């Protein structure tokens, strides 16, 4: 099994930046992709970004392209989501999710099988 712990959320003004971290433990050797999703109250979970665990491929949602980047630190089994120029409408709980030996489009949360507790990001106007 894989355990995920997110951190780095908080309150920021519009235009500000935050860096979210997702630390993985357990059977990390079984992870092939890690994704970031967000969910605002009353809305469906939305894809933000994904990165191949071993590197080489990243996917960024069009709505955040140019402002968000995803990166990795293999020594720490941690993946990061750097978020710049945040907007109030991006207020949500952000989740990292891991896909293990899976298949299917990485843009859909249903194709992941482990997720963290989420971290709240609040962007004030």
Image (tube, rainbow, N blue to C red):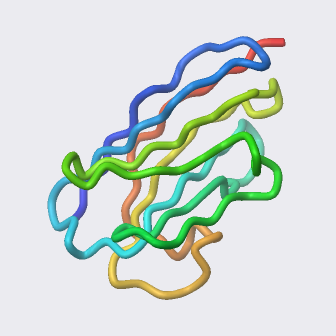
Residue 106 in which image quadrant? bottom right
Could you say where residue 64 lies in the image, as x and y percent from the top left?
Answer: 76, 47
Q: Quadrant of the C terminus?
A: top right
Residue 110 in which image quadrant? bottom right
Position of residue 84 in the picture relative to residue 19 (left or right): right
Residue shown at the point (70%, 55%) measured from the top left: 46
Position of residue 39 in the picture relative to residue 57 (left or right): right
93 or 125, which is in the foreground? Answer: 125
| Extreme residue toward the bottom, this view | 103
Could you say where residue 30 lies in the image, as x and y percent from the top left?
Answer: 24, 76
124 or 72, which is in the foreground? Answer: 72
Could you say where residue 44 lies in the image, as x and y percent from the top left?
Answer: 73, 53
Q: Quadrant of the N terminus?
A: bottom left
Residue 123 in which image quadrant? top right
Residue shown at the point (65%, 14%) measured from the top left: 12
Residue shown at the point (77%, 19%) measured from the top left: 15
Position of residue 42 in the picture relative to residue 26 (left or right): right
> Residue 84, relative to residue 36: is it above or below?
above
Number of callouts: 0
> Residue 4, relative to residue 59: is it above or below?
above
Could you say where residue 66 lies in the image, as x and y percent from the top left?
Answer: 76, 46
| Extreme residue toward the left, this view | 26
> Residue 66, relative to residue 123: is it above or below?
below
Position of residue 16 in the picture relative to residue 9 (left or right): right
């Amino acid at each position: 099994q894989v355990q995920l712990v997110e951190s780095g959320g908080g309150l920021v003004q519009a235009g500000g930046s935050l860096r979210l971290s997702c630390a993985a433990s357990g059977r990390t050797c079984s992870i092939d992709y890690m994704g970031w999703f967000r969910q605002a109250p009353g809305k469906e979970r939305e894809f933000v970004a994904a990165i191949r665990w071993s590197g080489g491929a990243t996917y960024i949602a069009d709505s955040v392209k140019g402002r968000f980047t995803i990166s990795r630190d293999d020594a720490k089994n941690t993946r990061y989501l750097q978020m710049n120029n945040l907007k109030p409408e991006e207020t949500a709980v952000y989740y990292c999710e891991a896909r293990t030996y899976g298949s299917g489009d990485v843009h859909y949360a249903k194709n992941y099988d482990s997720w963290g507790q989420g971290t709240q990001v609040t962007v004030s106007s």
